Image (cartoon, rainbow, N blue to C red):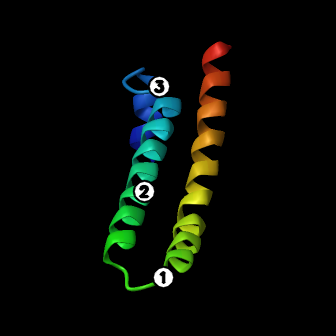
Amino acid sequence: MNFIKWADAKNFISVRSFVLYVTVWMTWEAFHWAAVFATLTEKTGADVALIIAAVTAPISVLQGFVFKVYSESRAQ
């Protein structure tokens, strides 16, 4: 965590950008997992859809929140 504070103070990378990039990566990983799960599972269609929604919905909400905060902080 000290590296992030140092990098932000030196304008090497902003914490806002770092958080946005990490959240985009997490979103990619969640949707990649969902695609692999959907192709390899033995479950029925409705069960697969519910499991994928349970995994990807929270990360989608987080992504929306982080992007909103990032956009608002850039406007200041």
Of the pair 12 and 64, the residue shown nearer to us = 64
Q: Is residue 66 above or below residue 43?
A: above
- Rendering quarter of residue 68: top right
Quote the CA–CA distance across marks 3 and 2: 33 Å
For marks 3 and 1 on the same chain, the one whose residue lies earlier in the sequence = 3
For marks 1 and 2 on the same chain, the one whose residue lies earlier in the sequence = 2
Residue pointed to by mark 1: 44
Quote the CA–CA distance across marks 1 and 2: 19 Å
Of the pair 9 and 50, the residue shown nearer to us = 50
Query: In which quadrant is the C terminus drawn?
Result: top right
At which x and y percent is residue 67? 59, 34
- Rendering quarter of residue 56: bottom right
Residue pointed to by mark 2: 31
Q: Please tell me how crowded label 1 is: few (under 14), some (14-19), or many (20+) other residues with Cα within 10 Å.
A: few
Identity, as a three-letter code, of the amino acid under mark 2: Phe
Q: Nearer the viewer, mark 3 or mark 2?
A: 2
